[in-house]
Amino acid sequence: MTLLNKFGLMLLLTTLLTSCGKDFLEVAPKGSLIASKTFEYENMLYTSQSIGFDIPLLVLGDDVSTLSTYFNATNLRFQRLFRWEADVYEQEQSASELQDPIKNIYLYNKIINEVMSSEEGSMAYKRSIQAEAIASRAYFNMMLVNYYGKPYNPETAATDLGIPLITIADVTQNNFTRATVKEVYESIIADLKSSIPDMPINVPHRLRMCRAAAELTLAKIYWFMADYKSALEWIKTAKEHLPTSFEVGLYDFNQTYTNPNWSVGSGFNNIQDVMVRISISQWILNGNEILLAPWVNELYKPNDMRLKSFTNVPYQGTGTFPVTGMKRRKGPTGAQVAHGVTMPDVTLMQAECEARLDLTDEARTTLVNFRKMRMPEADAVVNAVSKDDLIRFVIEERVREFALYGHRWLDMRRLSNDPLFKNTTYTHITYDGQNGAIMESHTLDPLRLTLRLPRGVIDANPGMPNNP
């Protein structure tokens, strides 16, 4: 059994046996877990929301800066990520950003391959559970290929290495082949399109993938591919299928972003989440390692309510950070970093698609309506007129909305092939913790837009090539 598989099985067993009970689960000879009834397969879908602990996305974006005082006390993994080094892990170290998606994909494959022959439940019910698992597998494959595959480029995607496409629930499998980026994207699209017709509009909880979440995941994969027409079409389709079994929408921060008593739901109760996928991070809220880069602070207007999410006072410290504009995030959702499918992300994706398709009036309206929920109406104006200026404005709005939450790294990746942004230079700066002087500056090598697989995984899978 490979190192990758060992970790996947260990985490899967821990999660399932503590979440679903032992009464219907065993370890079969080939390492698979046994369920017999359809509702038991459905229950497994509640155990697959984690995207990893302290995920690299939080460190890799250029919206992050740091102070030597805190940086020098961090572990090597953090330091290597911040410096955009080629190898992040020692041989014996594991990567939860790889383990958790692989664990979840194992679980989804089990459901996909077995639920149709399960006991009890109608065929329509079984198809809906299978469809949800297929679409959920597609979501995690999308995450993995955005770590370990090059940013999608139609000219090279057919030869760029992506990730292994795992379609069976066999933890003894040890012959992995990396599909190309094109093959991975085609597989994700095929999974989503095949599953959407059988997916319900309403699901019991935002932990689960509803039809709109699947459609918006499909929109996002097209967005990563720069197919903005298809992305916009799927966004519009999904908005007609938003669930009513729980509240979905945007918070008006003018009303709810009162500090220090946040009136914004956290965890699994945030109405902005259509589908929850989270990372628990010790770097957010109760740490000083990840700090707002000063250039990001300059993007906000003084009355932008999102500024209430930050403070220039160190956690459990005194005084203020010694660099103007450097801040840490203090809210509103605690140590849970939400990705999944969220309405702020969807709205800004829509605005970008509209701008890129020369629908400038629509893009401006989408942006203004969004910004009205983040600041006083008088400040929500969008002065950008031309197509290119609107696109740039959307990218800056994404920085303001998602600062220190990891989205910036994914934008840096996809924009690396965009004529408007491909010549952008990205830097990470370490400032002196005492006087704020620049101590180190690191410039991103484009090769590092793609993470190398952990050393232990490569060593345990002879013949699998790593990234440069």
Image (cartoon, grey):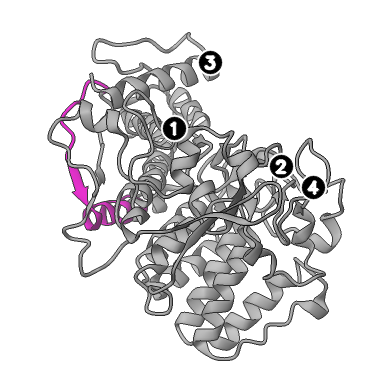
Rendered location of residue 360, percent (x, y): 55, 87
Q: Is residue 420 above or below residue 239?
A: below
Disc assigned to residue 266: 2
Q: CA distance from mark 2 to mark 4?
A: 23 Å
What whole-number distance in Å separates the C-alpha atoms at marks 3 and 1? 19 Å
Residue stretch rendered in magenta on the structure: 171-192
Mark toward the viewer: 1 or 2: 1
Residue 191 part of the magenta-drawn span:
yes
Contact, CB < 8 Å: mark 3 with mark 1?
no
Report which residue position mark 4 lands on: 313
Does the magenta-highlighted stretch encompass residue 277?
A: no
Q: Mark 3 or mark 2: which comes first in sequence?
A: 3
Report the Cα–Cα distance between label 1 and label 2: 22 Å
Q: Nearer the viewer, mark 3 or mark 4?
A: 4
Residue designated by label 3: 18
- Which of pointers 3 and 2 indicates the residue nearer the eye? 2
The answer to whether residue 139 is above or below residue 380 is above
* Camera-nearest residue between 95 and 436: 436
Q: Residues within 10 Å of mark 4 (few under 14, many from 20)?
A: some
- Quadrant of the rendering where the N terminus is positioned: top left
Going by the numbered disc 4, the residue's amino acid type is: Val
The residue indicated by pointer 1 is 96
- Disc nearer the start of the sequence (4/1): 1
Residue 141 picture location, percent across and down:
35, 45
Q: Which residue is located at x 74 percent, y 47 percent?
A: 332
Q: Which mark is residue 433?
A: none
What type is the residue that disc 2 sits on?
Answer: Ser
Q: Residues within 10 Å of mark 1 (few under 14, many from 20)?
A: many
